[in-house]
Amino acid sequence: MGGLRVAHYLNQFFGGVGGEDLADAPPQARPGAVGPGTLLQQCLGEGATVVGTVICGDNRMAEQQAATLPAVLALLRDLRPDLVVAGPAFNAGRYGLACAAVCGAAVRELGVPAVTGLFPENPGREALDRSVIAAVVGATAAGMKADMEHVARLALKLARKEPLGPADVEGYLPTGRRVNEFSDRTGAERMVEMLVRKLRKEPYVSELVVPQFDRVRPAPPVADLASATLGIVTTSGVVRAGNPEGIESWRATKWARYPLAGLEALSPEAFTCVHGGYDNRYIRQDPHRAVPLDVLRRYLREGRVGRLHEVLYTTVGNVMPVERARRLGREVAQELRDASVQAVLFTAT
Amino acid sequence: MELEIATYRVRDVEFGPATALRDGILSIDRPALIAHLLEDANLQAVDVEIARPGDSTRIIHILDSVEPRLKVSGGRDFPGLLAPPDLAGSGRTHRLDGVAVIGTANLSGAADSQGLKEAIIDMAGPGARYHPFGRTANVVLMLEPRAGLAATEAVAACRRACLRAAVFLARPTRALAPDRVDAFTLAPADPGLPRVAYVMPVMSEGEIHTTFFYGRSVQSLPHLVHPNEILDGALVSADYWIGCHRSPTYLYQNEPVIRELYRRHGRDFDFVGVLLCRCLITSQEEKWRQANQAAKVARMLDLHGAVITMSNGGHAYVDQMLLCQQLERAGVATVLGVDEYADADGADFPLVTYVPEATAIVSVGNQEEIVEWPAVERVLGGTAFLAGNAYEKGFQRRPDEPLTVALRQIYCSTTQLGWSTLRGRAY
């Protein structure tokens, strides 16, 4: 071993510090390879050495990135790397975001190439700098060996300043750069071939991908609220004190369900707000500003609302990737449907 | 509708005492061709040169390019422009394979806000593969319309000259045996095959720039057209705007998507026909009207799929994307051909506009890529570049000096009809 000096970034889980309970673990460095780093070292071969590993808890990075990232970067800098490898993070959202942030900072601040590995739907994809190469890897660590070989191959190419080919050929997520090339078939041939595949419902690869947004048609108005069952859903980030479910302050990966039965109001002692996208102190002072349970109770007493579905569904809507928002929305909608809820008070921020 | 196209292969073109085709060599009686073109009183001077593949030659100020054609039965050449608008696409047509008439003129004085743009090709070196005419022997017309003509009249005279030269050059084939004959008929296909059309919005904007369908500017109500009509001279380009994504008459005569749809007709799908549309429609309401009408026709034709190209750029994307959206909503699977505006470094989002229904797109390349090509020995078409955009620094040089420009200035380099193998790719 020798040659290129490689620094490896891992989260608390892959770094062997601990599981979800230690997701707040602060940045720490270990000499040499740790956990998947052993495999990385094998894949890199003789020409490169994993000189050290920097480990950080995913929540620490997600919730306190401004303070944490410089500390991670300082530990990386101490390793005097020629190349930084982060992950791979597979489809782990917070880990993917951390890898994207660490790689971006390594390129910017250390001036070395940085490579990570992400499943294409990992929300970390949205946080990638154009200078960072993210190898396309599987959703879980089940394919770790092949995925690490792939990450190492791209990393070595970059470190040796060998040009990378097109994203779909090399197997990395497009960085947003378009390059003209000559194909072996004309545009007309490719258009007709793509149409035939589309008609046969066979897979095809569009040469340009447009952003996709849903347009949601509003449901018809509730005819008689006085006889309807009302639900409450919020993306404002109102959670129970201490955030026991660990809902993330941005790019949240989950939602929580709180029973409201027997609860007249949301006190600032029992409820808080973890949304990281706005100044949430006014919600923390009075959670009703986001979830008006107090008013709803009054309306119930006055008969203006028929019945309340006694559950609050909550998450943080801050920079949530559209795909994930769709999934979370479907899950909550299913519960509401199962409870025969006819209308929902949906508060966002 | 049955069309036979007889191909006469031409290996080389030369000037000679008579216009004749012998052993693959086309001889041109240059004074006779010039005199023929000067019969048009709106032209005051004409010169002709030959530019062969590999020549150290740059051609500038290109207006249009046309393949030499001669209608020998079942119709007339370029109906609506050189003849009454009889139906094209039937009978027998001769073509010279490997030859193009390239019309050039310096009409910059005639330019207004809708003026003419530069269009350049190189016959040798790295630039030769970016346009369709690096592999053809080109008969280059240098045309000078009569002084004082309105711009519309001046370009009309140049257009007629290109078409008339194309017919003039193909005339010697009349009694000769061709190298190959191809028959074009949309034979009945297995009714179980998916029904496919080619939706073809061609450009028309302002007084100068348009596309002629039987001599009339194309309209924004979709026309159902037999593909043979387009292959046989019914469609003639009058697009003198941005050079890279022009659709010249030559590429209508050899329309790449139509040729490919014909090739796979009856095997992979039933090619129903061409829906000729307009792009660069100037009002939003009219854009919607066309898209809705096209979707209606698609439904009445019971279409399953369509290729949608476009012509020119800018808000032509809106026309194309609306067609895509309305066709998809009518249950028609679409594939789009586009060129990209991804900036010189390829880092910009490449589309002017899009709809979420556009899920199958073929890119014919980024028109903003900067190319650098070497100096040339000979320049045809003019002595100085037309005034370009301020960022076209390359236009401050003489046209024979090394060329550094965006592909935007290279004639047909990103034509969305897909003649080329150039493509934009994600890195």
Image (cartoon, helix red, strand yellow):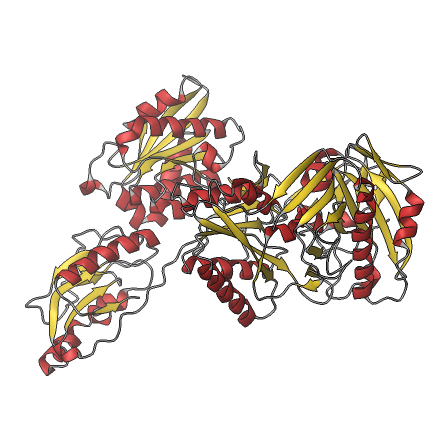
Residue B361 locus on image (x, y percent): 50, 48
Q: Is residue A330 visible?
A: yes
- Does A123 sit left or right of B27 as displayed? left
* Residue at image point 84% right, 48% down: B141
The quarter of the picture where residue B364 lies is: top right
Which is nearer the eye, B143 or A230? B143
How many marks are shown on the rendered structure? 0
Residue B174 locus on image (x, y percent): 79, 42
* Residue at image point 25% right, 60% down: A237
* Residue at image point 78% right, 47% down: B102
Residue A34 locus on image (x, y percent): 29, 27
Q: Is residue A33 visible?
A: no
Residue B317 locus on image (x, y percent): 56, 58
Which is nearer the eye, B400 or B319? B319
- Residue farthest to the bottom? A302
Which is nearer the eye, A83 or B268? B268
Judge whether B243 appears above or below A73 on screen: below
The quarter of the picture where residue A70 lies is: top left
Judge whether A161 appears above or below B216 on screen: above
The quarter of the picture where residue A349 lies is: bottom left
- Residue farthest to the left? A262
* Residue at image point 46% right, 26% down: A156
- Does B22 sit left or right of A46 as displayed? right
Which is nearer the eye, A145 or A342? A342
- Does A7 sit left or right of B259 as displayed? left
